[in-house]
Amino acid sequence: MGAPLTGQKSPRHALLVAGQARRCRIRGVVLKRIRSSLALKLMLASAIPSAVVLLVGLGVLVEHSRRIAVTNPALAFEELRDGAVVGTLLALTFAGMTVALAVRHFLIKPIQSLGQVMARAELGEFLVRARVHGEDELGKLSKSFNTMLSRVTDMAVTEIETREELSLQAELKSVNAQLQAHVGEMELLLEVSKAISGTLDLPEQLELLGKQICARLDVSEFSVMLVDEPTHQLVVEAVAGATLTGARGMRFHLGEGVAGEAAAKGQTIYVPDVVKDPRYLHYKGRPKASGSFLAVPLRSKGRILGVMNMNRRRLDGFDLQEVRLAEAIAAQAALAIANARLYQQTLELSFTDSLTAVANRRQLFLRLEQEFSRSVRFGDPLSLMMIDLDLFKQINDRYGHTVGDGVLRGVALALRRNVRKIDIVARYGGEEFCVVLPRVGKPEALEVAEKLRRSVAAAKLPGPEGGGPLTVTISIGVATLGIDADDVAGLIEKADSALYEAKREGRDRVAMAIPVHRASA
């Protein structure tokens, strides 16, 4: 047979390669078993060094005995025996030391390391990890412990994330509820502002305010007290709630009751339980209802206009947010009330004589037209008086216009004090006045005219400085609608004619207008 071809392996080479591979596999399996078994590690770590020491010792002993046996065979046996005993003891001692070192290296130190990690994990350090010293039982235990710690850490992270998510959701719900509450408060403020700013009529403003407060804030009783400037008292101007019927018009002194104290101090006063607070008067003698009470001052430009009061049936019925909302509503209401009063004052100035504080000529004609329409519609009588101060020019010429102005004011005051509230006293011009008497016929008008004439004549009017009081007389002309005239212009003309008739007859007297049918005759 020829030599094998180049690049081809012989059967013997293949067998050698296969045998080497088999030996590698066997060696790998053996090493794997040794690495994965703590017992095999301990056995090999203690047995191999001990066996090597024992064999070396036996070899040394045999060689020593052989040299002695050449000279003395009997002594060689004894040396061999003693050497065997000593060698065995040394081998056992070395084996024990080897076993102790192996146990310390492969068992005790890994267990101590694992125990330290477990102790730290017990204290809550879940991020620590045990050192894996090999693939034996302790190594597998360390791996399992590390896996457990990883899962515990994942669970803790998941729990923290879940808790944070729940906390965030709760916080979002709380913020959303607060935002909804703020939106509701802003809507209420806007509605209140629209309601009370939509009119300049003060009673209508207060009525709308009470309806809004009772409906939106669940208030059982509501009232507004305004300061009466002449008397410096609080007057109940508006109420809402069935239990407050008849409370309108009640008066309180500043400092009297909870509302009076709130107005006097200019501070909000909250009473959680009205039964336990002696300051709570509940509208002077009306049956006290249990619950809570809130009094908020109405302030505009640093000036107290009044107090806004609210009752609730339950104890401690107002929280801090509602108190702040009530104060914001009171600020809006105070601004609207101040504007309504300013508008009313402007109207009064435009329809009021600045000197005498009675109606001016414009207001006179406006009210005459209104009363004329009412008289025509319902058939009620209407009378008019024209009044003139007798010899008033002499007062001006003698004492000056300042004294004359004081006399005019005194006469106007005397006229107002001696007529009804529905009657109208107006300054017609100069020293002339008019008095409109709705639903008064000619006989009654003559009686009123005589009463006014006597009252003015008896009045003590302010005189010059250093002098005594003055007295004046008046002349009055009286005309009645339907008898003396058929319209406003005719009524004024007839009353004016009667006035001049009274002056021609000697002044300080009352004259009647000539009826229409007699004048035509």
Image: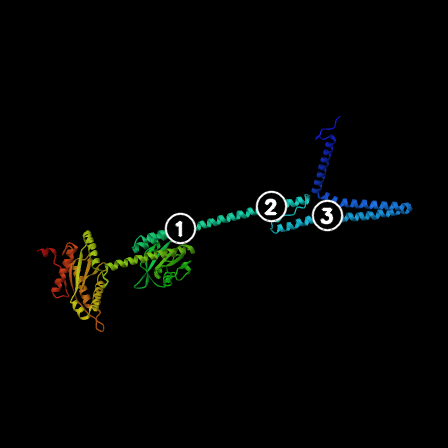
Q: CA distance from mark 2 to mark 1?
A: 50 Å
- Do residues under tags 1 and 3 come within 8 Å of each other at their CB atoms? no
Q: Residue furthest bottom?
A: 466
Q: Is residue 72 visible?
A: no
Instruction: Using the image, determine if residue 37 lies above or below residue 340.
Output: above
Q: Can you identify the residue that label 2 sits on? A: 150
Nearest-to-viewer mark from 2 and 1 = 2
- Dot 2, crowdedness within 10 Å: few (<14), some or many (≥20)? some
Q: Can you identify the residue that label 1 sits on? A: 184
**Model colouring:** rainbow
* Image spot of residue 133 (x, y percent): 67, 46
Q: Residue at x 65, y 51 (%)?
A: 116
Whichever of callouts 2 and 3 sits on the residue coming sooner in the sequence is 3
Q: CA distance from mark 2 to mark 3?
A: 29 Å
Q: Residue at x 26, y 58 (%)?
A: 347
- Residues 513 and 95: in front is 95
Instruction: Using the image, determine if residue 28 lies above or below residue 420.
Output: above
Residue 455 in which image quadrant = bottom left
Q: CA distance from mark 1 to mark 3?
A: 78 Å
Whichever of callouts 2 and 1 sits on the residue coming sooner in the sequence is 2
* Image spot of residue 216 (x, y percent): 38, 51
Instruction: Using the image, determine if residue 481 lies above or below residue 4.
Output: below
Q: Can you identify the residue that label 3 sits on? A: 103
Amino acid type indicated by mark 3: Val
Q: Residue at x 13, y 62 (%)?
A: 500
Question: Quick one: quadrant of the C terminus?
Answer: bottom left
Looking at the rendered structure, the secondary structure element under dot 1 is helix
Question: Quick one: quadrant of the N terminus?
Answer: top right
- Residues 12 and 371: in front is 12
Looking at the rendered structure, the secondary structure element under dot 3 is helix
Q: Is residue 395 left or right of residue 80?
A: left
